[in-house]
Amino acid sequence: VNQINISADLNCGFELACQWRNNTAGEDSGDFLITSNVRVANHFNIIPSRNNSDELFAYTHGPFDGMQKATLISNTISCQLGGGTLTFWYYRTGDSATLEVCVRQPPGSLNTADLRCFPVFPKNYAHQWLFNAVEFPPLTQPFEVLLIRSNYIQPFDIIAIDDIFYDAALCGKSCLLRKFSNREKIFI
C-alpha cells in the first residue's frame, strides 16, 4: 500500500486508479463498486453528477437484507499539520443507510476505539447528488481515512460517492527535519 505524500494524492473521481481501496480485513459484508450507471429497484437510475459519458463513481449496496457494512479506506497518511478537509459528492437512495467519515489511528487497527467518526447525512432524503465536507483536526500520527457505509437494506438502499477531494498540509521529510533541528536547538 502506497503512502500519501501530498493531500491531492487522495483526490479521486474514479475514472483513474485512486489511493482508496475496499476493506479486505473481513470486517465488511460488502464492497464499493465502480460504474457509470446503477439501476435502483426498477424505479430509476443513478448516473454521474456531471452528465459526462466518461464519468464514473463508486457505489455500494448489500447482497442480502439486514445489517451490512462496506468500507472504502485511504492509503496511509503520515500526519497532518493543522486541520484538513475531505469533500465529496454522495447519492443516497434509502433512509436506513448511514455513511460516516472516520479517521483511524493507528492505520489497520481493528479496534473500534481507534476510530473517530463524523456522520455525513443531514435529514435530507432527496434522490440527487449532494455535496458534503468533513473537517479533521490536526493529526500528528499516521492515520487512514475511512468512508463507512452501514445499516442498509437491499435493494433500495444504495450509496454512491464521487469526486473525493482532500485538502491538508501533510507532514513529510521537511516536517521531520524541522523536528530534529528543533531538538538540536533544545539540547544546545
Image (tube, rainbow, N blue to C red):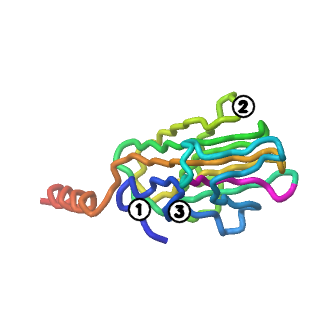
Q: Position of residue 127 (x, y in %)?
A: 70, 35
How far across and how far down the image is residue 179, in percent?
25, 58
Q: Does 63 lie within the magenta span? A: yes
Element on which disc 2 rests: loop
Q: Which residue is mark 2?
A: 125
Q: Which residue is depicted at the point 82% across and 59% down?
A: 63
Task: Identify the amino acid type marked 2.
Answer: Tyr
What segment carries the magenta color? 56-64
Identified by mark 1, the residue type is Ile
* Mark 3 / mark 1, whichever is N-terminal: 1
- Viewed as shown, does residue 179 lie left or right of 90? left
Q: Give the labeled residue for mark 3.
A: 107
The CA distance from mark 2 to mark 1 is 34 Å
Q: How far apart, in angstroms, are the residues tagged by discs 3 and 1? A: 13 Å
Question: As rendered, which of 187 and 171 lies closer to the eye?
Answer: 171
Magenta stretch: includes residue 93: no
Relative to 95, residue 33 above or below = below
Q: Secondary structure at mark 1?
A: loop
Q: Residue furthest left?
A: 188
Question: Which of labels 3 and 1 is toward the front?
Answer: 1
Q: Tell me which amino acid carries mark 3.
A: Pro
The disc placed on residue 4 is 1
